[in-house]
Amino acid sequence: MAIKSKRALSSTVRTSYDLYINGQWHSPHASERMECHSPLTQELLTTVPESDDADVDAAVQAASKAQPGWANLSAKKRQAVLEAAADALVAQLEPLALLETANTGKPLRESRANVFTAADRLRYYAGACRVFEGVVVPVTPDITSYGLRQPLGVVGIIGAWNFPLNMFVGKIAPALASGNTVVYKPADTTPVTTLEIAALFGSIFPPGVINVITGSGAGTGAAMVAHPGIRKISITGSTRTGQRVMAAAGATLKRLTLELGGKNAQVVYPDADLDRAAQGILLGAFLNQGQVCTAGSRIYAHASVADALKEKILALVPNLNIGDPFDANTRMGSLSSRAHFDRVSDYIATGVREGGRIICGGHPVRVEQYPKGLFMAPTLFEGVDPQARIAREEIFGPVATFDSWDDEDAMFAQVNAVEQGLAAGVWTGSLTRAHRASRAIQTGRVWVNCYNLYPSGAAFGGSKASGFGREDAFETLLDFTEVKNVIVDASETARGFYA
Ligand code: NDP
């Protein structure tokens, strides 16, 4: 299969998009369209179709038709295609990063980093698909049993709005590497880079291997979950959405990967390097304006170092540099949508009502270039009751709580008291403490003396109400396959059961 040349992207958002099905722009059956607004100006950015059942079906049919051909390519050829896709992304770094920032409000420097992360996922899975192995059991000298790993078929993938670009690429990479074809739905507010990348990849992947449809979760997303032609749903979203999807997927017995929300703690021991911890804690709490499932938004510092740590954190807050997201020096941009900004503002008001004290932030920030932008100051509370809503519920914005502890077991109990279990940070100079805390904290990931690192190959996913399944790692490939057991009897004569 020839890998054709790459198309150059424009950094201007198109005024409207169609669906991307079977390797081309596809006029939707549905007449209804959804509006996406700029988080920076609140003006209309673009419109996308609200796909109906017929559109979902068209995408599934295209994916279904393409699947056997794609699965039957040698792993070496699939590897070459995935690597070409990674090259195409990096070649379009600047326009893609500009589009991502225009659609989400996140700083351009983060959008650029997201493009590299996405390309790295493709390269990781390009290599990983070469090392699939099955178990061979020599049952007798004549009889051999072996496990043949085969793709599931058509898989449905549903993304959230906080990292639209690298979520799209990172989620489709293992599905494609293992020979599946994909129907993907981005979140309704942030479809731009997903659609542009689908079209960019249109000249690299065979038609029908990647199909992107747009629409609401309740309409289009639910139709994907119900569609009998889709064998698995992998979704990133809130815990409530995960519950709905799991209940609906039962009707067609779909496999699931659920990457859901988090309410993550960062624990600081008395022997921690406090300067390093202060920087890492800020990154953990405020990366992407805190709109990160792993946001380390509950800070628990040992009482003996709590005041010193707090002072160091507060001294670093001005470096977060809120402003025009297109400025290379900006570290914090706009929240992603008006509705979300209102939700975060409500949480801040609730935190105050419930008795929390704001020690920094707690208010919107006016950025001259974008007076209607949705900028929120990084906000830290202290004195928050463990039962308060801001201590228990995922805020998904730049809001964190600061608390102290002196009894380790009581601290672990408090860290684990929330319903979700996605990630945690541990800051300590002691290996013994690092290992003890990593075992005691009930999450799918623990970062020790670092935070918000997502290297390819490191299994990422949640426990408890943060969902199940792992992404970014080798086992993700396995999750997109099933094992067919083949038993071969190579004996020369019939066994004569009925002779
Ligand atoms: P939502 O749960 O609202 O939506 C996630 C996706 O699911 C969207 O594409 C949404 O569509 C779709 N959806 C909603 N309802 C249904 C349904 N009934 N059936 C099928 N699809 C549906 O989450 P957000 O987009 O608001 O994202 C934020 C959440 O995602 C946070 O809770 C965050 O923690 C979590 N998240 C988890 C991560 C992880 O890896 N664990 C990483 C990043 C975020 P639409 O938006 O178009 O309505």
Image: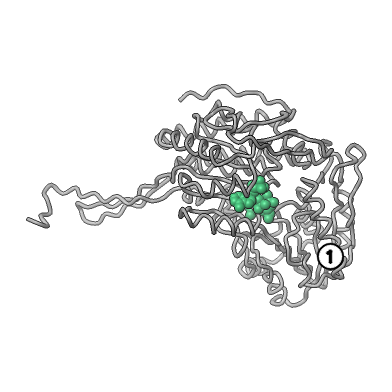
Residue on which disc 1 sits: 351
User: Looking at the picture, does residue 304 appear above or below residue 468?
Assistant: below
**Residue 329: image x %, image y %?**
84, 39
Tell me the crowding category of disc 1: few under 14, some 14 to 19, or many 20 or more residues within 10 angstroms, Cα based. Answer: many
Q: How many numbered marks appear? A: 1
- Furthest residue to the left? 499
Disc 1 CB within 8 Å of nearest ligand 1 atom: no
User: Looking at the picture, does residue 35 appear above or below residue 486?
Assistant: above
**Residue 39: image x %, image y %?**
80, 41
In the foreground, 110 or 165: 165
In the foreground, 69 or 139: 69
- Furthest residue to the top? 5
Q: Quadrant of residue 56?
A: top right
In the foreground, 184 or 10: 184
The colour scheme applied to this rendered structure is one colour
Horizontally, residue 77 falls left or right of residue 270, namely: left
* Amino acid on which the number 1 mark rests in the picture: Gly
Q: Image quadrant for the N terminus?
A: top left
User: Looking at the picture, does residue 426 appear above or below residue 477?
Assistant: below
Q: Secondary structure at mark 1?
A: helix
In the foreground, 173 or 219: 219
Q: Image quadrant for the C terminus?
A: bottom left
Whether residue 17 appears in this view of the structure is yes
Whether residue 160 appears in this view of the structure is no
